[in-house]
Image (cartoon, rainbow, N blue to C red):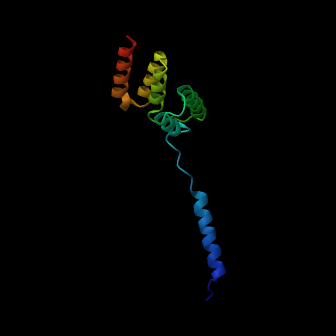
Amino acid sequence: MKTLGIGNIGALTLLSCIALTGCHTAPKQLYQWEGYQPQVYEYFKGQKGVEEQISTLEQDLQKIRATGNMPPPGYHAHLGMLYASMGKNDQVIKEFETEKTLFPESSAYMDFLMKKSKKQEK
């Protein structure tokens, strides 16, 4: 009976690992985050201007859409809050409506924010 040497076992193990690694594909991410989380962090630190944050988020949103992915929950709501701080109420409503459309579970909160925004407008 012929036995396998240590070199043959090592080669067989290496080939098995390569085969298993080659078969594995990373699962597709549900959302594409881009710079959303750092922008929210910057918002709370208050060290970055609102216009700069809006610009970054809008650019990232274009990248997300170009790849056919979805922004994470809260992305449009955060963008709407940034527009609210600039007094751009049309943009606020647009972003909150988009958040509601993409994430219906946020409807109650988005409705609350839109109602509050309209009261401040008057």
x and y percent of residue 98 in the render? 46, 25
What residue do we see at 52% from left, 39% from top? Answer: 38
Q: Quadrant of the C terminus?
A: top left
Residue lying furthest top: 122
Q: Is residue 32 visible?
A: no
x and y percent of residue 87 in the render? 47, 17
Query: 48 or 101: nearer the eye?
Result: 48
Q: Quadrant of the N terminus?
A: bottom right
116 horizontally vs 7: left or right: left
x and y percent of residue 48 in the render? 54, 32
Residue lying furthest front: 47
4 horizontally vs 108: left or right: right
x and y percent of residue 16 in the render? 60, 68
What residue do we see at 60% from left, 30% from top? Answer: 59
Q: Is residue 90 visible?
A: yes
The quarter holding residue 6 reads bottom right
Query: 2 or 40: nearer the eye?
Result: 40
Relative height, residue 66 to residue 24 (above, below):
above
Relative height, residue 118 to residue 9 (above, below):
above
Query: 100 or 119: nearer the eye?
Result: 119
Relative height, residue 112 to residue 38 (above, below):
above
